[in-house]
Amino acid sequence: MPELRYDPIRSRWVIISTERARRAHEYIRPREKPKVDVRSCPFCYGNEAKTPPEVFVIAPEGRQPNTSGWEVRVVPNKYPALRIEGELKREGLGIFDLVNGIGAHEVIIESPQHDVSLADLPVHHIQKVLIAYRERIRDLRKDVRFRYILVFRNHGGEAGASLSHPHSQLIATPIIPPVVVGELNTAREHYIRKERCIFCDLLKQELMLGDRIVYEDENYVEWTPFASAFPFETWLFPKKHLHDFALLNDDELLELARVLKDMLLRIKTVLGDPPYNMVLHTAPSPHPRPGREYYWSTLQYDYHWHIELIPRLTRIAGFEWGSGLYINPTPPEEAAKYLREAEVKVEDEA
Ligand SMILES: [Zn+2]
Ligand SMILES: [Zn+2]
C-alpha cells in the first residue's frame, strides 16, 4: 500500500509509493567520465593563481601562501552567488522585503588529487576537510551581517557540480534559509512544549524501532528518515545532543570523518556512485536581534546539528513542483536494508 507520511521536522507530507517500488539496482546507470585536462583545473596543484587568494589552508609549515603543497584549501568562489563587500541593507518596497545580496561564497578544495571522491579519501584526510568546515564557520560567524552559514557538497554533474575536482562549498547569507528556519521553528516549539530536543526524541525512537537504521557506532547514527522525500535519503546524526557543529573538537571530527566515510561508501556501493547533494545543518549565528534579545535563548537545548544526504536518483517533476508533495518510489525501510547490508571497509586509523 502506498502511504502518505508526515515529516514532523519539515512539517510536510511525502508519498511513499510502494506499488511501483524501485530497488537499488534500478537506479544504477552508466556514468560518463568527463575528460578534464588537469593542467587547466583551477583546483589542481600549480594552478593556485587561477583562484582568488586562499582564506584558509591546511598545509605543512613553511609553505608560501597560494602555492602547491597544501592538503585542504579554501578560496572564495570566483563566481559568487552573493558578494562579500558592502553594507547590508534591509528595505521595504510596499509589501515586498528586500535585502541586498551580501554574503560569502567559498569553495573548500578537499584534496589536491583531481580524480578522487570524498568517499575514497583516508579518514584522517576527511577529518581535515571537516576542520576546514568548522574553521570557516567560526570565522564567518564573526561577521554580524551573516545569519547563517550553509556548508554543502554537490557530487556529480547532475547534482550541480560544475568541476569534477573534489570540493564542497559554503554560502553565508544575511537571512536564515527557509529550510533551516522550518527546522529551527519546529525544534523551538517542541522544546517549549516538552523541554526536550525533537531530534533526540526522534533518534531515540528510530534506534528503538531499528528498521530505518543503516549504521550506528558509539557516537553517530546513519538512518533513512520515516518520511524520506527522496529514495535513499540518508541522515547522519550525532548521538550526543549538541546544537552546533562548530563546537566539535578535532577528536570528535575524526570520529565524524569515519562515519561520514562509511555513509558515502554505502551510497556509492549500493547505487553505483550516484550524483548526490549533501548539506550540513547546524545552528545559525546567534547574534542578538534588536528587540528580540531572547530570540536564541533555547537554541542550545532545542537544535541538534546533523548532515543530510540526497542521492539524485529521481527528478522533481510537475506534480512535486505544483503540489509540494514528493513521491518517493523506494520506502526508506527498503533503502535502509540495502545500505545496512552493503559491505564497506572504513580503515581503522589512530
Ligand atoms: Zn583538479
Ligand atoms: Zn538533541
Image: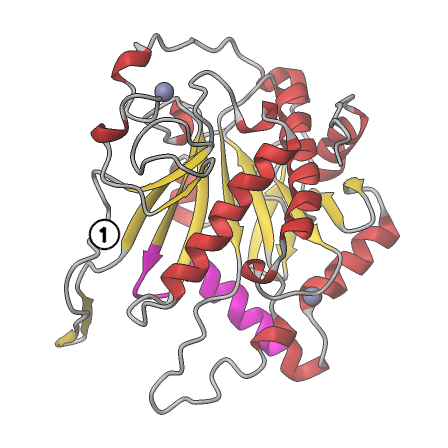
Q: Which residue is mark 1?
A: 82
Quadrant location, the C terminus: top right
> Picture coordinates of residue 149 (x, y %)?
41, 57
Q: Which residues are magenta?
A: 172-189
* Residue occupying the far right of the picture: 208
In the image: residue 148, left or right of residue 350: left
In the image: residue 242, left or right of residue 326: right
Within 10 Å of the Cα at label 1, are there few (<14), some (14-19), or many (20+) other Cα atoms?
some
- Along the viewing direction, whichever of 216 and 97 lies nearer the viewer: 216
In the image: residue 67, left or right of residue 151: left
- Along the viewing direction, whichever of 146 and 9 lies nearer the viewer: 146
Instruction: Using the image, determine if residue 128 lies above or below residue 48.
Output: below
Instruction: Using the image, determine if residue 126 lies above or below residue 189.
Output: above
> What residue is rendered at 69% in x and 50% in y?
251
> Picture coordinates of residue 137 (x, y %)?
44, 57
| Quarter location, residue 52 | top left
- Say if residue 325 shows up in the picture: no
Q: Is residue 161 magenta?
A: no
Indicate which quadrant contains ligand 1. Answer: top left
> Picture coordinates of residue 132 (x, y %)?
48, 46
Three-letter amino acid code at disc 1? Leu
> Picture coordinates of residue 311 (x, y %)?
54, 31
Q: State how many labels appear.
A: 1
Instruction: Using the image, determine if residue 36 lies above or below residue 98.
Output: above
* Residue occupying the far left of the picture: 93
Q: Is residue 182 magenta?
A: yes
